[in-house]
Amino acid sequence: MTTVHDFSAKRLNGGEESLSAYKGKTLLIVNVASKCGFTPQYEGLQELYEQHRDRGVEVLGFPCNQFGAQEPGDEKEIATFCATTYGVTFPMFAKIDVNGEDAHPLYKFLKKERKGLAGSEAIKWNFTKFLVDGDGAVVARFGPQDAPEQISRKIEAML
């Protein structure tokens, strides 16, 4: 596996999707949670998506329950929460692990390509973000504290 486009993942609705469907698009891949202090970032992620999707930007949300059990719901509950609370319309995927032996292969790849602070591969918390170019290369990693509004400027520079 050499690019993000080599992977697939299950959508919240249950269908498997190849990430090759996003070739040529700039991606912001985020591990999300519904009951986290950073959950209000959904609003900023949705705004970023609405501002840039016509220019080939996609936000991909991957719910994860590994940090303080802050994503306890099933796929239907997650979908309802995102739609009704934050009006999320960007692609959402089924709940996954991002760390450990059972980490989704996509996340194993993302972490290897762009390490975090002090060279650590581990995801430290919800709302860690990876910026991917249209060729599927991971170009940047952002921590949970990096708001979508800050990342929007970096995305604009790539377009």
Image: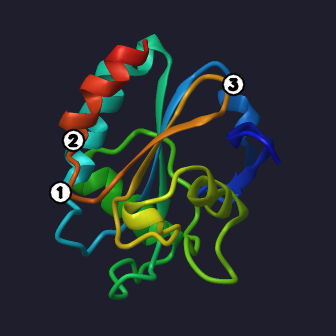
Q: Kindly give the residue lying farthest to the front in the view shown.
A: 118
Q: Is residue 73 left or right of residue 147?
A: right
User: Are dots 1 and 3 in contact, CB under 8 Å?
Assistant: no
Q: Say which amino acid is labelled 3.
A: Lys
Residue 20 x, y percent position in the rendering: 75, 33
Please indicate whether residue 157 sits to the left or right of residue 8 in the image. left
Residue receiving disc 3: 23
Side of 131 where 10 appears, left or right: right
> Where residue 123 sits: x, y (%)?
45, 69
Q: For the residues marked 1 and 3, what is the alpha-carbon distance in whole angstroms?
A: 29 Å
Q: Residue at x 38, y 58 (%)?
A: 128
Residue receiving disc 1: 40
Look at the numbered disc 1 and give the secondary structure of its residue.
loop
Q: Compared to 64, does 138 lie above or below?
A: above
Spatial CA span between label 3 and label 2: 24 Å
Looking at the picture, the colour scheme in use is: rainbow
Name the residue rendered at 50%, 76% in the picture: 74
Question: Would you identify the image quadrant in which residue 143 lies?
Answer: bottom left
Q: Amino acid at mark 1?
A: Pro
| Classed neighbour count for the residue bearing mark 3: other residues with Cα under 10 Å, few (<14), some (14–19), many (≥20) | some
Three-letter amino acid code at the position of disc 2: Gly
User: Marks 1 and 3: which is nearer the front?
Assistant: 3
Residue 36, compared with residue 25, is above or below; it is below
The residue tagged 2 is 44
- Work out whether mark 3 precedes mark 2 in sequence or the reverse, and give the earlier one: 3
